[in-house]
Image: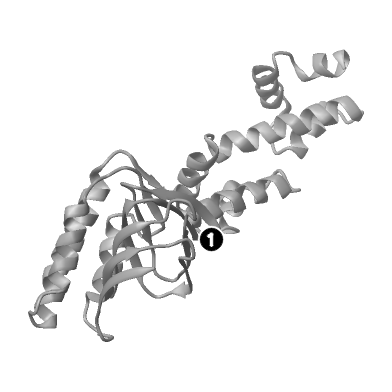
């Protein structure tokens, strides 16, 4: 493998460059950074490869950009049959944290077929200049900000957010495993440690249904099982599932299933 790399000594400025360069990868190229302290921006000039951050994996190929965030496990490797050629930069600092968070791309991101390679070259060339480090960092910070702004405005950006994915999956698990159907949604959300509005949003993004709709669908399924397999009075079933009264339960059940609970029990 051949690389053209420019690196800098550790700094404590708001915006810092660890290193930047162009990599001409071979079939053995593989990078593993457990709990990385840097943000990694890479633009694929040629070839393809695979990116994994906290068990979320995708393929990045010619024309794609991928971004790996700080405090995550970075693992990526080149395709053996079509190795990467890529231009990249690794950065860190308070300014980077705030910009990434403000523009909502502070998790691993994959942007397909979006050519802003000229900005990556601008960043690299500025980093290789003979200017003082402070001037290099200031000018590269402006290029970094322009890259982030462009990425945040396009429509074909595909965010793969392991944190949000984990929240959604954990919330679904809590709903699937709950035994007390009178528990409030707020109490369920408290178990996944995020705000109610955020939990609703990421759950819907992940499963294409709101948590409330999912909970109701689970209650209908359980009601069917209880109506088929027990002699429990319908009023007690309604109370067990957390409905305010028998009438509301019967109306809702009929709306979802097409027939009233009594008719459903009789027919099955």
* Quadrant in the picture for the C terminus: top right
Residue 243 visible to the viewer? no
Residue at image coords 17%, 65%: 123
Q: Is residue 23 above or below residue 12?
A: above
Give how far across and how far down residue 223 sits, in percent.
77, 30
Compare residues 53 and 119 and report the one nearer the observer: 119
Answer left or right for 55 relative to 267: left
Residue at image coords 45%, 65%: 29
Compare residues 102 and 27 and report the one nearer the observer: 27
Residue 256 visible to the viewer? yes
Quarter of the image where one finds residue 239: top right
Answer left or right for 130 relative to 238: left
Give how far across and how far down residue 79 sits, in percent.
47, 54
Quarter of the image where one finds residue 118: bottom left
Picture mark count: 1
Answer left or right for 205 relative to 229: left
Provide the residue designation for mark 1. 193
Q: Is residue 87 above or below residue 150?
A: below
Q: Is residue 138 above or below residue 165?
A: below
Q: Secondary structure at mark 1?
A: loop
Give how far across and how far down residue 199 sits, in percent.
50, 49
* Quadrant in the picture for the N terminus: bottom left
Q: Is residue 91 above or below residue 147?
A: below
Residue at image coords 64%, 38%: 215
């Amino acid at each position: 493998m051949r690389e053209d790399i420019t690196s800098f000594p550790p700094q404590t400025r708001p915006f810092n460059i660890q290193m930047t360069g162009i990599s001409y990868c071979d079939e053995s190229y593989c990078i593993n950074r457990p709990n990385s302290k840097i943000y990694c921006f890479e633009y694929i000039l040629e070839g393809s490869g695979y990116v994994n951050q906290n068990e979320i994996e995708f393929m990045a190929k010619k024309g794609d950009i991928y971004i790996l965030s700080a405090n995550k496990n970075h693992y990526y490797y080149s395709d053996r049959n079509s190795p990467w050629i890529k231009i990249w930069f690794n950065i860190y600092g308070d300014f980077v944290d705030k910009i990434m968070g403000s523009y909502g791309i502070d998790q691993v991101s994959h942007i397909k077929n979006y050519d802003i390679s000229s900005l990556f070259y601008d960043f690299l060339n500025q980093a290789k200049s003979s200017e003082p480090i402070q001037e290099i960092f200031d000018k590269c910070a402006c290029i970094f900000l322009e890259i982030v702004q462009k990425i945040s405005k396009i429509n074909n950006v595909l965010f793969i957010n392991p944190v949000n994915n984990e929240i959604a999956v954990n919330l679904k698990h809590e709903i699937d495993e709950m035994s007390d159907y009178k528990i409030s949604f707020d109490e369920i959300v408290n178990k996944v440690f995020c705000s109610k509005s955020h939990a609703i949003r990421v759950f819907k993004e992940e499963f294409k249904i709101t948590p409330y709709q999912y909970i109701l669908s689970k209650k209908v399924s359980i009601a069917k099982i209880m109506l088929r397999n027990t002699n429990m009075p319908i009023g007690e079933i309604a109370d067990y599932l957390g409905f305010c009264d028998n009438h509301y339960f019967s109306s809702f059940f009929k709306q979802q299933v097409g027939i009233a609970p009594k008719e459903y029990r009789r027919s099955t």
